[in-house]
Amino acid sequence: MHSSSDPFDFSEYSSSRDGTDTPPSDSPWSAGPPAGGGFGIPNDPFSGFATQGVPLGDSFATLQQPARPSGLEQGRTPLGWVLGAFVVVLAGIVATLLAVALGPVVWAFLGWSMAGPVAALLLAQHMVADTKERTLPTYDASPFLQGTYWLSVALAAVGIVLGAWQIAEWAGRL
C-alpha cells in the first residue's frame, strides 16, 4: 500500500497513469484557476476563504452577499373550504329535517347528498389545501378552524344518518 503525506491523494487509483483522463484546461475541474479569476478553485476547497496577499478579514468585505427575502412566507389554515363544508352540512341537515316534517323523500335524498358526498368533497379539498400550507416555512394553525372542521365532520355524520334513516323508511314503505 502506498504511504502518502496527503490523505486525500487518490492518484494511485486513477484509471490512466499517463494523464490522458485529465480534464481540459477550460473545465471547471481543471487544476488551474477559472477563466474569470472567480471565487475559488474547484480542486482547492479552502481557496475562497482568503485571496492571495489579502488578509482573511478583508476578503469577506468584498464578497457580494446574496439577497435575502424580506420575510418568510407563512402558511395559514384555509378558511373557505371548512366554512363551505360547514354551511353545506347545515343545509343538508335542514333539508333532511324538511323531509321529516313535510314528508317528500326528495328532501331526504338532497340532505343526505349534501351532508355526505358534497361535504366530504369540500373537507377533502380543505385537507389538500391545508397540507400545501403546512409545507411552507412557517404555519399559523387556527384553533377556531380546526374546531370548525371537526364540528363539520360530526354534523356531517348526523346529517348522513338522518338522511339515510328517512330514505330507509321511505324504501320500507314501497
Image (cartoon, rainbow, N blue to C red):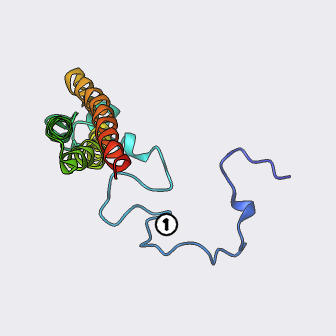
Front-most of residues 35 and 93:
93
Residue drawn at the location 80% of the way across and 47% of the way down: 3
Residue 10 occupies which quadrant of the picture? bottom right
Where is residue 143? Give x, y as percent.
24, 21
Amino acid type indicated by mark 1: Ser
Where is residue 42? Give x, y as percent.
46, 56
Residue drawn at the location 22% of the way across and 27% of the way down: 148
Where is residue 50? Give x, y as percent.
37, 40
Front-most of residues 121 and 127:
121
Q: Residue furthest bottom?
A: 20
Residue 127 occupies which quadrant of the picture? top left
Residue 98 occupies which quadrant of the picture? top left
Task: Give the secondary structure at mark 1.
Answer: loop
Name the side, left or right, on which 63 lies relative to 42: left
Q: Residue furthest right?
A: 1
38 w.r.t. 143: above or below: below
Q: For mark 1, does the 10 Å Cα neighbourhood hold few (<14), some (14 to 19), or many (20 or more) residues?
A: some
17 w.r.t. 165: above or below: below
94 w.r.t. 22: above or below: above
Front-most of residues 146 and 159:
159
Where is residue 131? Give x, y as percent.
32, 41
Image mark count: 1
Residue wearing tag 1: 30
